[in-house]
Image (cartoon, helix red, strand yellow):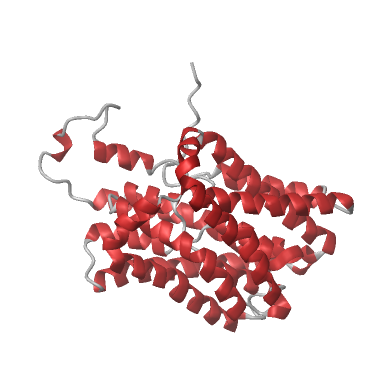
Amino acid sequence: MHRAAPKLPSWLPVDGFILALLGTVGLAALLPARGPGATVAEGASTAAVALLFFLYGARLSTREALDGLRHWRLHLTVLACTFVLFPALGLAARLLVPEVLPTTLYTGLLFLCLVPSTVQSSIAFTALARGNVAAAICAGSFSSLAGIVLTPLLAGLVLPGDGGGFRAGSLLPIVCQLLLPFLAGQLLRRWIGGFLTRHKKVLGRVDRGSILLVVYAAFSAGVVRGIWHQVSALRLLCLLGVEAVLLAVMLTATSYGAGKLGFRREDRIAITFAGSKKSLAAGLPMASVLFGAQAGLMVLPLMLFHQMQLMVCAFLAKRMAARTVPEPRRAAAPAGPGGAAPAEAVAAAGRRPPGPRD
């Protein structure tokens, strides 16, 4: 018999992957890769990034994405929030430099505003709040797909080349390490899609391991170069405060903005969760390509924002679900094969902590 895991408050999701990331950061701080070890770690990280995006491409169902085109207004709204409103707020935060945020942390905050939305956690929280799950699936997939092209282009336009370490020459590595593997995965999907589906759990561990390797290589390079001495505890607290305001503004803008645009409640929920979130799994490998040795410091704002959005969105999703008025006799619907009604099963899936693809 398997022992039951200790219960935690349902509004406070403890993301085990975040704990693993923090452990990896600690390992890099104590035992950073140096000399030949750093060369090996960098090469392994490059291969891991290519593998990640190959798997992303092979998993994305082209048919599912095309089926979702009928929700084009919803998808355009999410894309506008992710790649227009978020970057605009990031650029506005430039006013906080250097009094509140140093240039290095501001560059990481601006990069956070450029990465695509999440997929799995957007779906999970939309399901928990009883929103349009199908729309959340398509919106998250479209955002991830668009981010492979838009994030590097926006980074080239708005990130400071001197402070952040971004170089125009990084666009070619982006194409080779991200776009080409993704396209290869799409082309081979018809032959390997079944295998990926059957081994989803194993490949999930590959995802996590690859991302942890990328984090270790990036943070090791930062430790060796001494970039962590540039950030004080007070600056980190200021960063958390700025990110809390950023998340609050985006949640408010997506929720009320979707209402003003005339979307029905289920679609507004999908827009709120897909349009206000950022993908850690997509951002980490992109940062390693864009920033090189400075990637460790650049992804720190994204890592903090990721955990913050999980905690806040879990609380909001439960509040939204509680405010939903069930249809008469809906609770008496026949149970599915697993003992729960289909809608309940979908909502239950939303209570699981999001996986590494976010």
Depth order, front residue of 171/215: 171
Q: Is residue 90 above or below residue 14?
A: below
In-image side of 325 versus 53 (left or right): left
Viewer can see residue 114? no
Depth order, front residue of 113/238: 113
In-image side of 238 versus 221 (left or right): left
Quarter of the figure with residue 159: bottom right
Q: Is residue 328 above or below residue 96?
A: above
Residue at image position (63%, 69%) is 108
The extreme bottom residue here reads 95
Q: Is residue 79 above or below residue 213?
A: below
Viewer can see residue 147? yes
In-image side of 163 versus 337 (left or right): right
Residue at image position (45%, 51%) is 60
In the image, residue 269 lies at what x, y percent?
31, 58
In the image, residue 173 lies at what x, y percent?
67, 65
Q: Is residue 354 above or below residue 175?
A: above
In the image, residue 336 lies at what x, y percent?
24, 30
Depth order, front residue of 340/145: 145
In the image, residue 301 lies at what x, y percent?
61, 64
